[in-house]
Amino acid sequence: MPLPPIEKYIYKVVDTIYDPRSCNNEVSMDSLFRIKGYQLRLPDHEGFEVYYLEDIAGINEANKNLTSGFNGRCANFDLHFYGLLIYYQRATKTARLLPVYYNWYGESEHERHFYIDSNYRITLAEKIYSEGDFESNHPVDIMNGGCYKVRMKKTGEFEVRKFGE
């Protein structure tokens, strides 16, 4: 389904280690997204229209939400799938993108999953899978990544708190 017109994208980096904040040559993820549609419309929150988008982003896939610059400049970053909560402010035509789901590869498999309750309390959990010792009973090493609580402030900023360490 089509979104209202967007003039500015703000991509929120939740974790500087696990988030694809940039790809090759320090290309900002803000500059790669040109989102036109969504899968699910959620109730408005704090004056923002809220949408959910999930898409396939493989370099060989037909992706409608990433600019053409993604393929040429982000070849070392293999983004497979991603899901974004889009907080849209109609007055400024600004879309604030919160990466709540992803699966990407960069020497190991990275995943993020999310839960959102009816009060818009968002919980994010990350896992990393890498090759282990194939001779052992554990050929894949599974490491817990960060766990976060996220909320949108009335100012439009995301407040992110890490927990569970």
Image: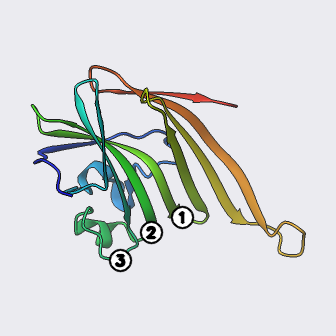
Residue on which the image places disc 1:
106
Q: Is residue 89 visible?
A: yes
In front: 1, or 15? 1
118 left or right of 105?
left
Q: State the CA–CA distance, disc 2 to disc 1.
A: 7 Å
Residue type pointed to by label 1:
Gly
Query: Residue 163: image x %, image y %?
Result: 62, 29
Give amino acid for label 3.
Glu
Q: Marks 2 and 1: CB-CB under 8 Å? A: yes
Q: Quadrant of the C terminus?
A: top right
* Residue pointed to by mark 3: 61
Q: CA distance from mark 3 to mark 1?
A: 18 Å
Q: Nearer the viewer, mark 2 or mark 3?
A: 3
Is 131 above or below relative to 97? Answer: below
Residue at mark 2: 76
Q: Residues within 10 Å of mark 1 (few under 14, many from 20)?
A: few
Q: Secondary structure at mark 1?
A: loop
Q: Tell me: 127 left or right of 53.
A: right
Q: Residue at x 32, y 52 (%)?
A: 29
User: Residue reaching furthest bottom?
Assistant: 60
Say whether residue 77 is visible. Answer: no
Q: Position of residue 4 (x, y in %)?
A: 12, 47
Q: Which corner quadrant of the image does residue 63 belong to?
A: bottom left
Question: Could you tell me the amino acid type at mark 2?
Answer: Asn
What residue is drawn where x is 27% and y is 57%? Answer: 32
Quadrant where the N terminus lies?
bottom left
Q: Position of residue 95 (x, y in %)?
A: 22, 41
